[in-house]
Amino acid sequence: MPAVRVTAPQTQDLRRVIGLGGGIALIVGITIGSGIFRTPPTIAGLVPNPLVIMGLWTAFGVISICGALTVAELSTLLPEAGGVYVYLRQAYGDAAAFVFGWLYVLITTPTTIAALSVVFAEFLLNLLGMPGGAKAVQLIAIAGIITLTGANVLGARVGAAVSEVTTLIKVIALAAIIGGAFLLGHGNVANLTAGGTVQGSGLARATAAVIWTYDGWIAISMIAGEVVAPERLMKRIIITGMLVIVTLYIGANLAYFYMMPLGVMAQQKEAIARTVMTAIAGPAGGVLIMLAIMTSVYGALNGNLLAKPRVPYAMARDGLIFSALGKTHPRWGTPWVAVLIQGAVGIIMVLALKDYDSLTTYFVVVEWAALIFAVGAVFVLRRKLADAPRPFRTPAYPWVPLLFIAGTVVGLSAIVWGQIHVGNYAPVYGLGIAAAGFPVHHLWQRLKRSA
């Protein structure tokens, strides 16, 4: 029976300082960022039917929970820094793990960081009533990345503390929108049933926006090496966090539809939450909710800069990437080189891909394609590591992971078709970069052998 690989230097150098509250704050904080405050108007413009839209949010909420339940098993089986990277390496070998890490370094992490920082800049300019020129957006976005990169070099405890505060604010903000709409707002339930004909291409593009909004929950697995008693806490962190996320997403969308017809929602752009709260509590309420939204986006950006650099860190410790990325700071105990490089690549992405929608469609297909293999690893590891201790087992196995895989395959196929239909080949380019990781891994291995 193959033994579980444990990368000893990871567990020695990274400090276990994240508890239950910090972990839940991270998964909620990373996942709930800009999407729920920015994508509903975009989706309303693409899918002129509120019931279909709510079906999308519910379906991918269920799919995400199925994925999270499976990852909860994997994270307690292999509670190491790197998360998905570790599961893929154990299940499929070094090449698959390298390609995932390659994607995280070059595509998924920097584009997520860039997209969140761009949205933060847009919201700040909206709050100040200033024109959102490309240069202004870029400067603010870059400043946000630099600030939080520095904070996460200072330690996981600092980053987790930032996430706890910002997550509390964003949860209160969404609860205020939901409660305010239904208790104080003058809305109309009939808005939920007033819809038109849905076009296939619009539905496919809306699917991308919904998946992007749910994206992020997997990042909590990356910091398993810094969670106190991960075999006990990881399952509670993941399950509690996902239930909070799905409840808030569905509740917020119902509140938006209750407060305004679909055609009005489609015109709101980044100001939908502000419009709702202004209608409920006046201009002061609108300003407060915008401040809360900016805090939400800032917190998600912080969470990504905290969790995701643990992937290149783990790769470096396993000899699959430059060893400098595996260094931990002697004072703060953080993978500071990996954090700095991911922040720097995020800044490059802000400058290269200025448009928010280009940023999100560029990576969402690639990241969720990787998640199919990550969730599929549970089937492989149930055989390879049959006798290994599993503090948590996926309920309703194998149906829960199979539902995630099937639902994700359908969703991603629709996205690729929809993007190609409108002439956007970004997902195809992203998949091409992913495939290029295999020959790069082969070359890396040859260089190591000849060194």
Image: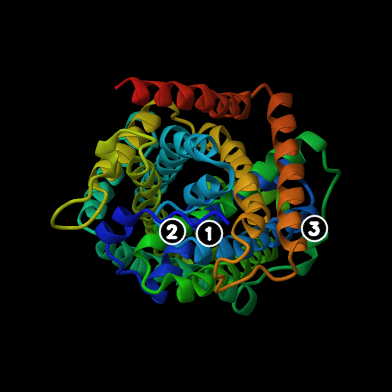
Q: Position of residue 406 (x, y in %)?
A: 77, 49
Residue 339 vs 276, above or below: the answer is above
Q: Is residue 79 visible?
A: yes
- Name the amino acid, label 1: Ala
Q: How does the figure colour the protein chain or chains?
A: rainbow
Report the side of 202 relative to 426 (left or right).
Answer: right
Mark 2 vs 3: CB contact within 8 A: no
How crowded is the residue under tag 2: few (<14 C-alpha within 10 Å), some, or many (20+)?
Answer: many
Between the C-alphas of marks 1 and 2, the distance is 8 Å
Mark 1 vs 2: CB contact within 8 A: yes
Mark 1 / mark 3, whichever is N-terminal: 3
Between the C-alphas of marks 1 and 3, the distance is 20 Å
Which residue occupies the foreground of this view, 156 or 278?
156
Residue holding disc 1: 273
Mark 2 / mark 3, whichever is N-terminal: 3
Question: Please, what secondary structure does the residue beneath circle 3 have?
Answer: helix
Which residue occupies the foreground of this view, 52 or 2?
2
Residue holding disc 3: 51
Residue found 58% across the figure and 60% down from its top:
71
Q: Which mark is residue 289?
A: none
Q: Residue furthest bottom?
A: 183
Q: Position of residue 419 (x, y in %)?
A: 68, 29
Q: Nearer the viewer, mark 1 or mark 2?
A: 2
Q: Position of residue 160 (x, y in %)?
A: 32, 64
How crowded is the residue under tag 3: few (<14 C-alpha within 10 Å), some, or many (20+)?
Answer: some
Which residue occupies the foreground of this view, 69 or 60?
69
Between the C-alphas of marks 2 and 3, the distance is 26 Å
Residue holding disc 2: 293
Mark 1 / mark 2, whichever is N-terminal: 1
Residue found 75% across the figure and 38% down from its top:
414
